[in-house]
Image (cartoon, helix red, strand yellow):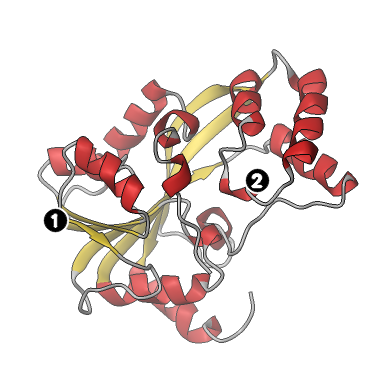
Amino acid sequence: MRISFDSVAQVYDRTRGPPGHVMKQLSDTLIGELRGYKTVLDVGVGTGRFAKPLQAKDFEVVGVDISRKMMGKAVEKGVDNLFRGDACFLPFVDNSFDVAVCVHILHLICEWKIALREICRVTQGIMVSTNYVRRDPLREAYNRLLKGYGCESRRLGKGEWELKDLVKPLKTVFVASYDASADRRLVFLGQRVYSSQWEIPEEVNRKVVDELKRQFAGKVSPQELQILVWDIKDLKDFCVRFGNNPV
């Protein structure tokens, strides 16, 4: 089972991630952390949010994604070396890349451990991802209200932010602190732009968002963004030990 983001390709960039200035800090910090490496695989390259700034700094970046429309937006930005493919069956030989970039991909894949094993197979150095440190009271309230209607938001696999509790990262790098606007999130939740919402009935989503507006309108929540860096050898050891067991 795979989730394609074709349906939200046109709005993806404006409905995902931190504010623009924080996204710039994230790109700059990532570039600094990858200094000394050359070849990069961006797994779930999407619209090229990471591939574009890395290619601009002369990294040899290859992107792979299952969504043609998302990669079409990346092409519009000037991103090249894009392949349509499945993270569980990466079309590359062993040890093809120094670095794998894997940001908010594994939670979309039932066979997330297979995808992780494939990433480890084609990467010889490190894997990097991002992590939001603080709790998300708006999302917690959304999920709690959904359960009151007998619904649950969709999540197939295990997120990279959860992987850090299973495999200790080589390092954790601070990027930025900022205030996340609840009003902005409420608009996007109302539009059902997040993949976790796509199986929620529209009427249920509307009622839940209306209740959230009464609770959260005008509020902000402090947020902290990090980059997580894993040694591929540690991830490979994890795949060997737990590859066939539920985690």
Residue carrying label 1: 38
Q: Nearer the viewer, residue 194 or 199?
A: 199
Specify few, some or many for label 1: CA neighbours under 10 Å numbering under 14, 14-19, or 20 or more. Answer: some
User: From what the image shows, is residue 245 above or below residue 222?
Assistant: below
Residue carrying label 2: 197
Q: Is residue 102 visible?
A: yes
Q: Nearer the viewer, residue 40 or 170?
A: 40
Q: Is residue 145 left or right of residue 126?
A: right
Q: Amino acid at mark 2?
A: Gln
Q: CA distance from mark 2 to mark 1?
A: 37 Å
The residue at the point 37 percent across, 54 percent down is 67
Residue at the left extreme?
Answer: 58
The residue at the point 58 percent across, 64 percent down is 157
Residue at the right extreme?
Answer: 148
Q: Is residue 46 visible?
A: no
Q: Nearer the viewer, residue 242 or 153?
A: 153
- Give the image location of residue 137, x and y in percent: 73, 34
The earlier-in-sequence mark between 2 and 1 is 1
